[in-house]
Amino acid sequence: MTQKEMADKLKIAQPVYSKIEQKAKVDDEILQRISDVLNIPAEVIKNFTEEAIINNINCHFADNAINTVYNVNPNEKLIY
C-alpha cells in the first residue's frame, strides 16, 4: 500500500502520513486508526522489530530455500 493510499484511508494528506511514518513514536489514536486500516492489532505495530520479522521469515522458510546458492558449472549446462 502506498503512502497516498494509506493517507486516503486515514482521511489525511499524504505529507502528513509521511511525517507519521518518520516518527519514532506514534500517538495511540493514530496508531489505532492505522491498525484498523491494516486489520491488525495496534500492539503488533507497537511491538514490531526487524528481528521478529526475520525470525518469522526463517520459520516459514525452514528449508533455507531463500538462502540457497546454486553453483552451476558452465560446462555442465545443456543448451537445447
Image (cartoon, grey):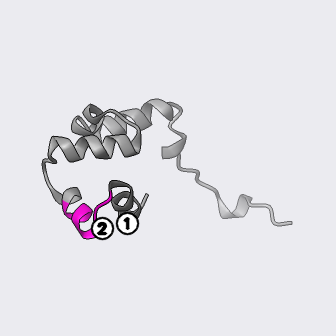
**Disc 2 secondary structure class:** helix
Residue displayed at 35% across by 40% down: 36
Find residue 48 and report its horizontal and vertical position in percent.
26, 39
Up the image or down, 42 lies above or below 37; here it is: above
Give the mark nearer the N terminus: 2 vs 1. 1
Front-most of residues 24 and 39: 39
Residue displayed at 58% across by 53% down: 71
Tag 1: amino acid: Lys
**In the displayed structure image, the side of residue 33 where residue 80 appears, left or right:** right
Work out how far the residue at label 2 is from the one at label 1, CA to CA, in angstroms. 5 Å
Question: Which residue is farthest bottom?
Answer: 15
For disc 2, the marked residue is: 14
Residue displayed at 27% across by 35% down: 42
Q: Are marks 2 and 1 in contact (CB under 8 Å)?
A: yes
| Magenta extent | 11-19
Find residue 11 and report its horizontal and vertical position in percent.
32, 59
For disc 1, the marked residue is: 4
